[in-house]
Image (cartoon, rainbow, N blue to C red):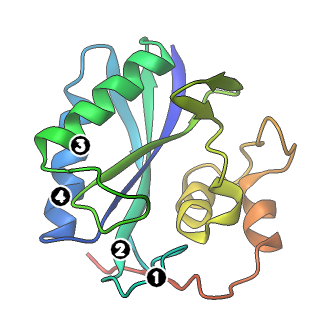
């Protein structure tokens, strides 16, 4: 069994409902058990040119017995069922599910790179990761989540806790 950290985000429609639906579906996958859920954050879109609504983002930890490629396939299927259509990079999305870490494994495959290659540059990933696992060490950068968060400048990456 591996502990996997999955980033979850939405900036279209019922953001909270979209994220909760995705979490529920992940928890019902054979070989997956949700261990913990970060608090939710309202986050400024990063890396986009056109105006977009802000995201609701968070991270969950999942204990799984399935492989990283199989898990990614399941996550993509959940995205599709929830209505995500992939037309262009960094477009608004009803749901976005990313494997951030798969234990401490380093995976380089055609359609899967773990740790997520941009996570250390994204406050909307680092803040909920630091909530869940502040001392978890990035297996490539050899720094903990709290340390990576402190090293990241805040420039145009507002992250505001959502009060439930």
Circle 4 — which element? helix
Residue under numbered circle 1: 44
Circle 3 — which element? helix
Q: Earlier in the sequence, mark 4 or mark 3?
A: 4
Circle 2 — which element? strand
Residue under numbered circle 2: 55
Q: Earlier in the sequence, mark 1 or mark 3?
A: 1
The quadrant where residue 62 appears: top left
Residue 49 lies left or right of residue 164; in this view the side is right
Residue at the front extreme, as displayed: 87
Query: Callout 2 environment at 10 Å: few (<14), some (14 to 19), or many (20+)?
Result: many
The CA span between labels 2 and 4 is 11 Å
The residue under the point 58% across, 66% down is 127
The CA span between labels 3 and 2 is 16 Å
Residue under numbered circle 4: 18
The residue under the point 62% across, 27% down is 103
Name above or below for residue 32 compared with residue 46.
above
- x, y percentage for residue 22? 22, 45
- x, y percentage for residue 155? 68, 87
The residue under the point 20% across, 54% down is 20
The quadrant where residue 116 appears: top right
Residue 2 lies left or right of residue 137; in this view the side is left
Mark 2 vs 1: CB contact within 8 A: yes
Residue under numbered circle 3: 79
The CA span between labels 2 and 1 is 6 Å
């Amino acid at each position: 069994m591996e502990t996997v950290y999955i980033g979850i985000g939405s900036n279209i429609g019922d953001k909270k409902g979209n994220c909760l639906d995705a979490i529920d579906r992940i928890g019902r996958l054979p070989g997956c058990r949700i261990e913990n859920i970060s608090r939710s954050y309202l986050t400024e879109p990063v890396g986009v040119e056109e105006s977009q609504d802000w995201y609701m983002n968070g991270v969950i930890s999942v204990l799984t017995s399935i492989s990283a490629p199989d898990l990614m396939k399941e996550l993509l299927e959940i995205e599709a069922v929830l209505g995500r259509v992939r037309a262009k990079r960094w477009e608004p999305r009803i749901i976005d599910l990313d494997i951030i870490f798969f234990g401490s494994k380093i995976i380089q495959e055609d359609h899967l790179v773990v740790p997520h290659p941009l996570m250390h540059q994204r406050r909307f990933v680092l803040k909920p990761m630091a909530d869940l696992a502040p001392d978890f060490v990035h297996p490539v950068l050899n720094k903990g989540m709290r340390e990576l968060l402190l090293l990241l400048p805040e420039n145009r990456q507002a992250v505001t806790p959502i009060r439930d």
